Image (tube, helix red, strand yellow):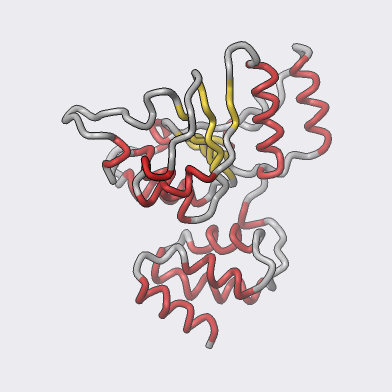
Amino acid sequence: MRFKPESVFMDVAAIEPGRDFRKAIDKSVATCSVVLALIGQEWLDLRDSQGGRRLDDANDFVRIELASALRRDIPVVPVLVRGAKMPHVEQLPDDLKELAYRNAVELTHARWKSDVQVLLEALRPYLDVRDEDATVAHREDRGKEPGEPVEEVSGVHGARSRSDPAAVASKIEPQTMERIIKELAPYIGPISEVVVKRAAKRCSSVEDLYGMAAREIETETDRAKFLRSCRS
């Protein structure tokens, strides 16, 4: 009840029949400002119907969502529930190893309300929450009018900034961003505009933006080609 409902991407509800869920998840995660990885006691060793560990399945929804966020360097917050512990780096597949180094937030039954407030405060910097929203949150704590809701993903929660990522001001000149978008589009498609403008918010130089945009390209050969075209 803290952020607007449209701020949350829930894969099981948002992916239409017939769509490639891998591409749909990747595209949706790319627009998120922060991702919450909800980790319970069985999360690390949960098995599929064939007895294999779900985290070892490259097509598992949760793995795809987390790997997509980590690859883009989107903030990923592990949320530990029911006494769960953080996984060690050697227990995770290669594309999830970075998760082991992310600071976690714990939600406990005994301290539920205060723990949730800690989580909300951790999310505020990523979601462009205005100062007046703090007043709304205070009212909610006292049982008055509810504020603005958050969003959800199966096993992973992705929260989008209230502002359109493509509309947020950046230190990078618009003409430069447009050129990078144009150079990136042949490799990842129309989502290049969202990716570049979102990345520009976290870059202090054009060179940083080149590097962050290059991470979206799958092969090393194509990444090198993209960087050469940007710098020429």
At 63% from the left and 28% from the top, the residue drawn is 149
Image x and y of residue 118, in percent: 69, 28
| The one of 88 and 37 positioned closer to us in this rendering | 88
Q: Residue furthest bottom?
A: 232
Q: Would residue 1 appear left or right of 44 to someone viewing this image? A: right
Image x and y of residue 145, in percent: 75, 17
> Quick one: quadrant of the N terminus?
top right
Image x and y of residue 122, in percent: 67, 36
| The one of 32 and 35 positioned closer to us in this rendering | 35
Q: Would residue 71 appear left or right of 144 to someone viewing this image? A: left
Res. 5 image quadrant? top right
At 37% from the left and 74% from the top, the residue drawn is 222
Q: Looking at the image, is 155 positioned above or below residue 67?
A: above
| The one of 88 and 99 positioned closer to us in this rendering | 88
| The one of 34 and 139 positioned closer to us in this rendering | 34
At 60% from the left and 57% from the top, the residue drawn is 198
Q: Would residue 229 appear left or right of 222 to someone viewing this image? A: right
Q: Residue furthest left?
A: 50
* Count of marks placed on residues: 0
Image x and y of residue 223, in percent: 41, 73
At 63% from the left and 44% from the top, the residue drawn is 161
Q: Looking at the image, is 159 positioned above or below residue 2?
A: below
